[in-house]
Image (tube, rainbow, N blue to C red):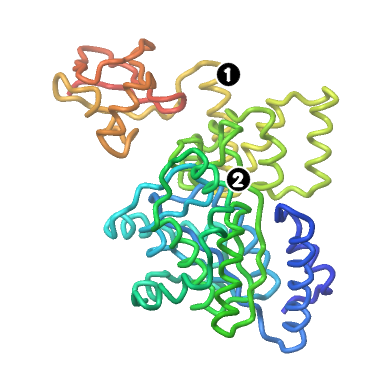
Amino acid sequence: MSKLTIDEQVAILMRGTDFGDDQTQEHMQRELRERLIESKKTGKPLRVYAGFDPTATYLTLGHTVPMRKLRQFQELGHEVTFLVGTFTGLIGDASDKTSARPQQTPEQVAEHARTYKEQAFRILDPAKTAVRENGTWLSKLTFADVIGLAANFTVQQFLSRENFSLRYEKGDAIWLHEFFYALMQGYDAVAMETDVQVGGTEQLFNLLAGRKLQEAFGQRPQVCVTMPILVGTDGAMRMSKSTGNHIGITDTPEDKYGKTMSIPDSAMRNWFELVTRWTPEQIDKLLNAVERGELHPMEAKKKLAWEIVSIFDGDEAADGAAAHFERVHQERKLPQDLPILTLDGPTNVVDIIHLAGFASSKSEARRLVQQGAVKLEDARVDNIEMEIEVQTGGKILQVGKRRFARLVSR
């Protein structure tokens, strides 16, 4: 267990949290302190978890915000579970949505979840992390069990949630299965008998549902620790895979760096505070320098981009990504390590994009063309039926701002 005092532990674990109101924060901080005192007396670590639904094959920077809080609990000697929502992922969390999420098939969820464990260990200590799937217990609930869970809540409680109330006022559909999500997440806390659950501020209702169900099952209600939302690269909406304003932690160092450089100045404090290793004092010093005109916002973002790449890929990769950005985006030169793609005669542009690995599917490649994100020899390609033929010398294909390939003939 940690040698830090209880006050020092509370300060670390509550740093950066956001509960939406002071009363809830004071209540959760008091309960957390009580749990930490008991843990120190008994020598029994707290059981802490956060859940992540596999809606794609990769985690984003936004996911790392609660994961970094889990890491703090680990470093203080507590038991941490990285919970993969193999069952809740079938339903889809509507917490931050103004419309229903598309439902996934079990096959899609399984495929998306396959790489989550490896990615989680980029933040969490693998020797101190339990990885579990909530399909283990949720899939075994009977219809009578679900009715029993639902009996603990009213429709009015769900309609009081901002996202549901807005849809109700507009006359938009609110599907019954969306209500079940909070019940399922709440039951996760019961099944694991957790002491603390970490999540985003938009999930506070679900975390509190866990407290209510634990009480109904005769358990002590968990402490809720909620973190602010990381805005996406657009600087406005929450970072999300569905809106495309995200950075995946498995993205290349060059993509991580370049996407970070694209965020608006207004998003810098949010990113500085949630995805760096910097202290509050270091963050204030940097942003104050920007405000006084002593440091250009671009230079501040370069520091941020380097820091993010360094966290996930190391200092050497961060140096390389910075040099790549300077060469390609500031000096307008082609990358030094330009990949070469050999074509056997005329080839459809969509097939080329897919073969080059610039799109995970041909449908995504078609969207990139239709969105105007593809150039051939610096001329925009807007026809998905275009056939590209290379004679001599090769041609340069550009997809987005950061991906290039030299096309040559066999």
- Examine the rendered structure and indicate whether residue 131 appears above or below residue 170: below
Work out which quarter of the rendered image holds the N terminus and state it: bottom right
Residue carrying label 1: 330
Image spot of residue 13 (x, y percent): 73, 64
Label 2 secondary element: helix
Q: How many marks?
A: 2
Whole-percent x, y for residue 363 in the image: 26, 33
Closer to the chain start, of discs 2 and 1, is 2
Q: Which of these two is toward me, 319 or 136?
A: 136
C-alpha span from label 2 to label 1 = 21 Å
Q: Is residue 16 left or right of residue 313?
A: right
Image point 34% across, 57% down: which residue?
Answer: 109
Residue bearing mark 2: 310
Q: Residues within 10 Å of mark 1 (few under 14, many from 20)?
A: few
Q: Amino acid under label 1?
A: Gln
Q: Identify which residue is drawn at 83% across, 38% down.
A: 285
Farthest residue, direction bottom: 42
Towards the viewer: 119 or 322? 119
Quadrant location of the C terminus? top left
Q: Residues within 10 Å of mark 2 (few under 14, many from 20)?
A: some
Name which residue type carries label 2: Ser
